[in-house]
Amino acid sequence: MLTKRILTMMTLIVCVAVIAVFSYNALRNPWLWFDESGQFWISKGLNHYSEVYAASGGLSDVIENNRHYNLDPGGFSVLLYFWLLINDSSTLFLRLLPYLFFLGFASVVFLYTYKSSKNILEAAFLTTLLFLWEVTANEMGEVRGYTMEMCGVVGAVYLIRFHSVLLTKRFLLVLGIWLSVFSLSRYDFVVFVIGVSLWIFLGLLHERLSFGKLVARLAYYAVPLIVVLLVVLVVMLMHQNPAGSAESYLYLGSSAHAWLTPLFLFGALNALLVIYDYKKGVVVLPSQSLFLVVFLVYCLLSLLRIFPLDVRGSMALTVVLTIALVERFFLIIPVHSYIKVFVLFCLMQVCRTTPLSELGSTNIDTKTFLEFTELKQNSSYDKLFVDYWMNPDFRYLYEYGALRNEAQKDGYPNRFVLQIDDDDPSKVVMPGEVDCDYYIITRFSKFTKQYDMSPFRPLNDESQDIYQRN
């Protein structure tokens, strides 16, 4: 018995150590990529292309800039605004806010797994895998609303899985308030809310309540949601989407390959299994039936070209699907914990596109930062061009980030030509000729397509981000 306890304790220590290592990797990265730096500037009451060293705005400026420079409801922007009032000059502290939401997400997964399996090691193993799976690990320190959304989704699924035996007024009120708060994270969460609401409605119909009781129960759930969503609609969405068309990052387009993504294929498989269980009279867990309804809602919106079926755009669906699949194949089946975890880990490696050593780095542009720091130390340059997509990143670096104490030495901002229009590279913040010694350009920039880059070569043969004059 003592030996078993020691082994259990040692295993838990190893899990905590793995979590600590990958958490550190997520928090230490000094580079913010375009979405992150844009989020930072919005929460400072500014935007991606504000003047250099512009004074921070107030809360009303945060809301105004979120309307025009973000396609999220703005709840995370407001939270980050108050967070930055404590400290706005530490990238580690900046990343700590989304990381805290990720810890909340991981903690609920631990509780969920432990209550399902009654096995603390199994719960610890599966929770640790969240820090090793690129879909979740790459978001844990990203300065965006993804982890807030993930925390909200897993919390809602937990409530439904373990507290929805009877759809009481108290349960419906708690769930409605929870969903209302996290509806402010991302619009993807709102799609999840539609699925949950449909599941609640079907569940209440199944109880065969009188019309009056049905309306009363629905009111407890729906009133807080309706209030919050109306505020989002009036304050934010109407201004973000004045033409009435789908936001560009939500648009599926005509591509058929979205239906062949692993997300859709695994989702379709589990949906068929849930339907099969219903037909066979097998008791279906609330989390499984919830997944089926949410998945069908996403499929319908995808068919209507309103919302995509992809991992990043449909993070809420990814979380619900992952819970449903793990619960079906790994928590119910009586197999040793280490075998389950080994199989899961192998599946993650098969699907991996990010090297294990880079998990949690949150972006693909860290190499550009390292190359630039080497360049500025070893080279003298008169002008350095920073393209549209790198502009907010470099302004953050020199005004609030890792290079803020080196701005004067590096000649920021006078030696930098900051592009502010991707369609017209001649539009820059600083006047003067765009005749630079180095060009810092993202791989998807239109600059390389519109300008002859033959006089320049990549600074590093493995990178296409920094070009220097031949």
Image (tube, rainbow, N blue to C red):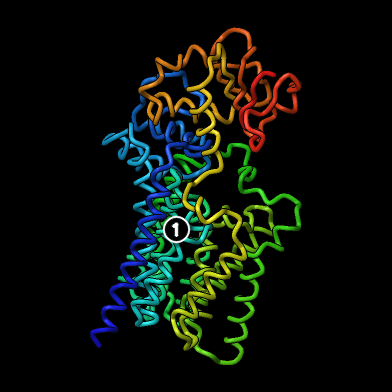
Figure disc tally: 1
Residue 317 vertical position relative to residue 463 in the rendered view, above or below:
below
Tell me the element at label 1.
Answer: helix
Point out residue 190 in the picture as x, y percentages from the top left corner: 50, 55
Q: Which of the two residues, 202 or 16, is positioned nearer the viewer here?
A: 16
* Picture quadrant where residue 435 is located: top right
Q: Is residue 169 above or below residue 438?
A: below
In the rendered image, residue 445, in percent from the top left (x then y), is placed at 66, 31
Give the left or right position of residue 446, taking residue 57 as reference.
right
Please report the residue visible at 39 percent of the width from the left and 70 percent of the height from the top.
Answer: 158
What residue would you read off at disc 1?
150
Q: Going by the image, does 460 lie left or right of 233?
A: right
Quick one: 11 or 269, which is closer to the camera?
11
The quadrant of the image that shows the C terminus is: top right
**Mark 1 crowd level (few <14, some 14–19, many ≥20, 10 Å Cα):** many
Q: Residue furthest left?
A: 2
Task: Find residue 89 and report its image quarter.
Answer: top left
Q: Quick check: 107 above or below 243?
A: below
Q: Is residue 437 visible?
A: yes
Which amino acid does the dot numbered 1 rest on? Met
**Point 55% across, 14% down: residue:** 381
- x, y percent for residue 50: 47, 22
Image quarter (top left, top right, bottom left or bottom right) of the N terminus? bottom left
Where residue 203 sits: x, y (%)? 47, 77
The one nearer the camera, 22 or 44, is: 22
- Residue 48 is left or right of residue 456, and the answer is left
Residue visible at 75% across and 53% down? Answer: 255
